[in-house]
Image (cartoon, grey):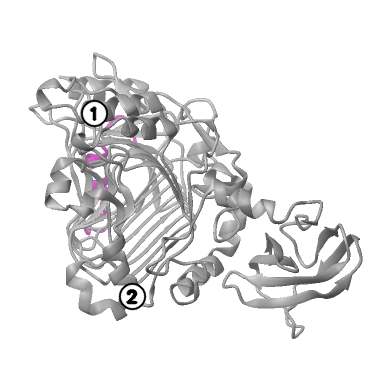
Amino acid sequence: MKKWSMLLVLLCLALAAPIFAQGEKILDPNDYINNQILGDTLANGARAHSVYRLERSKFYALDGRMDIKFKLEIVGPENGGMLHDTAEGHPPVIVNTPDNLGNARPSFQLLAGGELILKNFIMSGLVSTGLMVGDMMTSNGGKRFEAQNMVFCDWEERIFRSRSTGIDVKITDCVYLNGGGLDYGVFDGMSTRFDVTGNSFILENNTMVNVGREICNAGPFLKMKTTILHNSFINMIKCAHEMRHNEFISANNYWLNWEFIGYGPNQIRSNDIYQMNFTTYNDYLPIKDKLDSVSCYFGQNGFIIEDKINAWFATKTPQDSIHQSGYWEIAAVDSFVLRDNNYKIGTNYLNFHPNFVKPAHNTDLLVAFTDAYWKPPALQPLPPPDYRVPYIVNFTSEGVPVCHWPLPFDLRYTNETWLTGGSDGLPLGDLNWFPDKKAIYLANRDQIIAALRDSMMNAKAIYKPPARTPFITPTTFIADKKCTTPNQIDLLQNYPNPFNPMTNITYRLSKPDHVSLVIYNLLGQEMRTLVDAKQAAGSFSVKWDGLDNAGRPVSGGVYFYRLKIEDRTMSKKMVLMK
């Protein structure tokens, strides 16, 4: 009955549909999406439309899974980005109806030739009976899946699961909330899983809160190119990663409370390093003899476990055999790094507190859940402590969908190290929280990715066995600052920044010294020497006109300027816009 009562409510809420451009059609909340799209054909059987529009503040319903063998685009109205949508009402919402037994059902399945593009709306995996969908969307032969400026919430297993060889998947500017449900399972709640090799996977500028891994591969495919840039990952209950790609670039992201439940006796007995560590981008057996074809760069990412979680693990004794997960399994990573010079773990940031404007999580509830998780099953409280974000979409007792908007958190932050911590000089994590910085990123994206790809061969700050991975920590950061105290040398931020075509660089000396001021690109290659001379004490300003040492214009992008005096150096980042 709840299935039909919900549709009746949607009928009552529907208003007249506006007219859109030819080739597009407005979907009607009065009818199931399946009926409207699958029945939208011409007399010859061809598709009448390929783009279907949704209206703000409306709810739309699917009647079970919809199979797609054609190109389909479902689009809500532009809203300036989900993170900044505070207008009256809420983005459109698509929900599914339960089956006759009350179970949740998948929403879309891509079949041979199918393409699915989703933009600017909310999809919830919760149905009116209170259950959540397992896999929200799947592909069995599809060619392409794209999601942009979406909110995905409340699912058990995966938002998108692919069994399609050669598919291209691109996810940008999306928000993922509350994957995996409220139970003691630890391997669910993923954003994306590939059961067979894809062609490409792009994950950029997304925010994921209370989820599992951002990507899971089920086999050593070694053909897919994967790019994971500028994402914010918060409270990943289990996030061990595999190295099963032809090319893998992961940079400028942050993980807050990653793998927060740690590992226990079962993993110790079985030497299950997969669950003992954040990442095992390492010596996965099927690729031992194929390392020349595999490239990986993992650097300029932020990691932090909050103090209250650390304190809980500190109460555990050796007899408990409960431990916090490591960053990577050193021995296996060493064997991989030593055998393949295309595999680089770069500098990463450890234990910087971001200082969010309004956090998306409750650390006390995370600790309570972790404590409950490690109790004997007979003593585990049911339901478990609920650390999730409150529902964005839920239902009344009569089965009527309700949207709670806007998002109840603000993940802008004030940590100075993170604010310029990316390889591109931009903030770590989802740049949608910093719109002006995102504009810089988009203007220079190709160069930024090219520089990261080159880092597979040429990165300077990298992990070199048998040394430890070069984490930047608050302690080392402060130590670096102490060696360049302002009363000795002081390097100011260039102005303007970003700039085109010229910027000013100002520095101060407390005593006479030999000064070197050099411009470098992201790869550490010298572009221009601005100063190489002895100078008196005082303040100096130097202009850079965007030319290299040969007088040639350099390309737009991120550059470093480095001031060196004797054995002391300071450097800052700047952006040349073109």
User: Percent position (x, y) of residue 278?
Assistant: 32, 51
Q: Quadrant of the C terminus?
A: bottom right
* Front residue (pair 302, 407): 302
User: Percent position (x, y) of residue 371?
Assistant: 26, 27
Q: Residue furthest left?
A: 101
- Residue 356 relative to residue 303: left or right: right
User: Percent position (x, y) of residue 263?
Assistant: 23, 42
> Above or below — where is 294 with respect to 306?
below
Q: Measure the C-alpha gap from mark 1 to mark 2.
A: 42 Å
Disc on res. 338: 2
State yes or no: residue 524 in magenta.
no
* Front residue (pair 156, 70): 156
**Disc 1 on helix, strand or loop?**
loop
Q: Residue furthest front?
A: 318
Disc on res. 182: 1
Residue at image coords 25%, 49%: 276
The amino acid marked with disc number 2 is: Leu
> Above or below — where is 163 with respect to 54?
below
What secondary structure do most residues of the magenta stretch adopt? loop
State yes or no: residue 34 in magenta.
yes
